[in-house]
Amino acid sequence: MVRGSRARGGRFVTPAEAGPPPLPEGQEWVVPAGRPDDRVAVFVVPEDAPPLVREGFARRRVQTLEGECPCGGHQHWPDADPTEGMLGRVVAHHFDDCPAGDAVLIPALLRWRGEQGSNSDAD
Ligand SMILES: [Zn+2]
């Protein structure tokens, strides 16, 4: 029986020979586990973020680089390779209350953003 697995989030993948396009600040391309010809965009772990946000981004990075999140969740690749020069979507699964899952990470990000907003208002 599959325990509490949900398809959450996703990452874009592109064939390496196409050359990955530039990413917004705070993201970078990495070589995913077992797929040396692909590149996946991940977020850089923000050093100034609260521990839950840092843990969530760190787990997403681990899942991409090693193929499995510490919660046991795997990532699922599209059946077909993306057309050259196009981006494909990789779906990441996380179990229960994993900090990398959207159900935990997105609210944590919103709280952090709210705190940043209230801090800048006080300046
Ligand atoms: Zn996880």
Image (cartoon, helix red, strand yellow):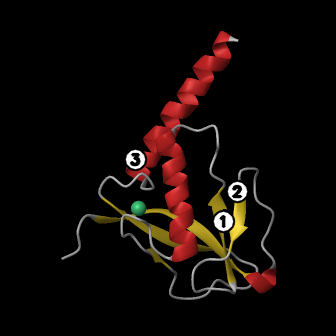
Mark 1 and mark 3 in contact (Cβ < 8 Å)? Answer: no
Residue 115 is drawn in which quadrant?
top right
Which badge, 3 or 1, comes first in the chain's sequence?
Answer: 1
Q: Which mark is residue 30?
A: none
Whole-Å distance between the Cαs marked 2 and 1?
6 Å
Residue 103: image x %, image y %?
38, 49
Instruction: Say which element carries label 2.
Output: strand
Is 24 situated above or below 17?
A: above
Residue at screen point 64% across, 43% down: 47
Mark closer to the chain start, 2 or 1: 2
C-alpha span from label 3 to label 1 = 20 Å
Residue shown at the point (70%, 12%) measured from the top left: 123
SS for dot 3: helix
Nearer to us in this view, 19 or 49: 49
Residue at figure coordinates x 58%, y 38% from the top left: 49
Residue lying at 51% horizontally and 36% vertically, measured from the top left: 110
The residue that mark 3 highlights is: 104
Q: Decide which of 9, 70 is in the foreground and name it.
A: 70
Q: Is mark 1 within 8 Å of ligand 1?
A: no
Pointer 2 or 3: first along the chain: 2
- The CA span between labels 2 and 3 is 20 Å
Check mark 3 vs ligand 1: CB closer than 8 Å? yes or no.
no
- Residue under numbered circle 2: 27
Q: Give the image location of residue 104, x and y in percent.
A: 40, 47
102 horizontally vs 28: left or right:
left
How crowded pointer 3 is (Cα within 10 Å; few <14, some 14-19, many 20+) is rated as: some
Left/right of residue 122 with respect to residue 10 in the rendered view: right
Name the residue beneath numbered marker 1.
41
The residue closer to the viewer here, 84 or 6, is 6
Which amino acid type corresponds to the residue marked 1 in the rendered image? Ala
User: Which amino acid type is marked by label 3?
Assistant: Val
Residue 37 figure quarter: bottom right
